Amino acid sequence: MDLRKDTKDAFDIVINRIKKILLSGYGLTVATSWGKDSMCLSICAVEAMNQLKAEGFVLKSPVLFLHSNTLVENPSLDDYTYDIGNELRYYAEINDLNLEYHIAEPTITNTFIYKTIGYGKLPIYPGQQRHCSIDLKITPLNNLQKEISKTIGSNAEYVAITGKRYSESKDREQRMRDNNEKPDHICIASDGTRAQHVMADIELDDVYGLLHYQSQKDQIYSSFTKDGTERTLELYRSANDGGCLAAKAESTLKSEPCGARFGCFTCTAAGKEDTSLINMIASDTEKYGYLMEHVRFREFLLAIRFDWSRRDATRGQYNSQTNHLTVSPDYFNYETRRNLLRYLISMDADELERSGGVPRYQHVTERDIVAIDIMWGIQGCSDRGFSALEVWHEVHNLGKRYRVPEIQDYHKEIVPQKKYFDLTDYDLDEVGPTMFTNSVYRSQIEEISNNVGYSEGYTCPITGRKLAGCDFLETSFSLEICNESAINMVEQMTQDPDFIYNRNHFTNDQAVLVPFANGVAKTSKQHFKKFHRMAKMTKLRELISQKNDYPFNLSQFMYGNAKSEYEYNMTSNAKGDAQGQGSFLDTPGFVSREEKFESRLIMKTQDHKRSDTLTNRIKIKKDSNEEATKPPEHMQLNLLI
């Protein structure tokens, strides 16, 4: 048996499939994570380009190699993927290959830092649907490809090739065959995107065989990396306690394949342990010991899953018809989120010191700090503004460190049921204006949303300094932070004596609006309105707290005094079709009374086993005496906030 020949024969077929795509006039996209499968795919794609060039074929459009960085990858992988990407670019340049390498990143509002620490959303825990890959990988890659296609002005239709294989698992094979995903067949999705899984019939032995031979001096194909695939194999060896099937050769053919997989260090969906991360540390403590704090961070997220004292139950939906507020512990509370931020920034500061100023990772950037402070300010998390910036200052400038505690897992408990807080005794007209309706700031916010630059001489509400005019376009993203401007803002504010010595006089309003006023942040008109509604909910919580003599724990107070599902349904049935006070979210100012709010109508079937969510636009009436259009009796209306 000639193992080398068998390996080459298997991948020659893959290379010919790739060549056929290019010869048919399609553009080519190679989505790569630089793992074992996508490394083999990339080797084949580069070899196909080399062969076509030697045959005199000229590509009409560049082959796009796309890599997705979730921003919470295992830090050791960041170094590896960064180096491999740069070596691919250099190889393409010196060999005159029409190839481009790009890195996609999620928008700031889809990052772990913003979603979990800023907004309070829980991570994906074991047993829950892993939709995070859509926000962190798939959507960024799709958006990047669209942007690149516009930039290069190519009319070619692109086909994305993947390293998906039937033999990865029985479930994977069944899904691929059900979807007619064949190695020599281009699949067209409902949105028109094209993909071909050119490695579908490749076995795991073949994958490790190619990686083995490409790591030798006598390689099968030309290598675009300086040491072939040795670093790829080394990562898999270290992640599998040194027992990885690193080569397809007679002596190792019967060995067990690699079991550990690489992923985000914040990922709690995989279960109790991140096997690859732990094995890497065990394999070489001197080289990978710095990752131990990442292991503790993930274990901490898992340990507090059922610790309800770390949750906030006050951020539910407001139903204007029944005048109730949903209360359910579905978010991390502010204290938990601030601690998570402290742990990550401390890890960053340690890495800065350890590396002598050239860190391998920085999980929390100045851009993240600005975004978090905007969200914490809107939610009124603290009694003063710029709390995230304060943590940054404490750690990076004052030298404080916060270590991830080792705590016992909270035993799985019955999840508290959703309850409903009655607002009948509260005059919602007392809910005060937000930073988006306050006359001091409103005109400035409207200028930003209307795509108008500031005039010279605008005074910053924090420092009192005159600012230069800034012109920038409204963005289609929900929130966009300029990285360079964020760095300047964080640096200037943490050196300002007022910020250092007079922290208490900084307000949440300032934390939200100063980034917009200075051109550091921008958003869409629609998202400004969402920010407004979120801020109104914060004002409502403040009103509830005030009317009840400021309870020590508002979340516990509201949950303890809320109605059960049964009591709520009885109350709702008793009210019949009577209207509530109307939406207190509808206030004069930035959001007008005529504005249409999105509502969710949940269709209940007769057997109550299935519900279909519909989106309807409900127009809020100016005249409170004029009855709004009622939904059909078999529908329940819940106003989205």
Image: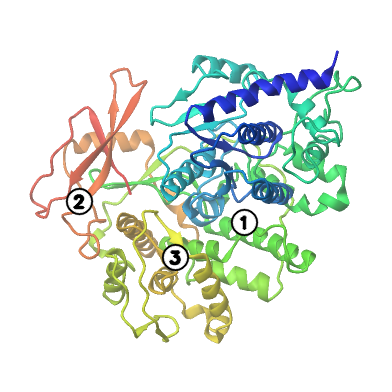
The first of marks 3 and 1 along the sequence is 1
Residue 74 visible in this rendered orientation of the protein? no
Q: Is residue 44 left or right of residue 443?
A: right
Give x and y (percent) for residue 596: 21, 49
Marks 2,1: beta carbons within 8 A: no
Q: Secondary structure at mark 3?
A: helix
Write down the residue under mark 3.
Answer: 377
Write down the residue under mark 1.
Answer: 340
- Identified by mark 3, the residue type is Gly
Write down the residue under mark 2.
Answer: 582
Quadrant in the rendering for residue 170:
top right
Q: Secondary structure at mark 2?
A: loop
The image shows residue 37, relative to residue 385, as above or below, that is above
- Foreground pick, 110 / 175: 175
Give x and y (percent) for residue 582: 20, 51
Separation of residues labelled 3 and 1 (CA atoms): 17 Å
| Residue appearing at x 61%, y 69% in the figure | 392
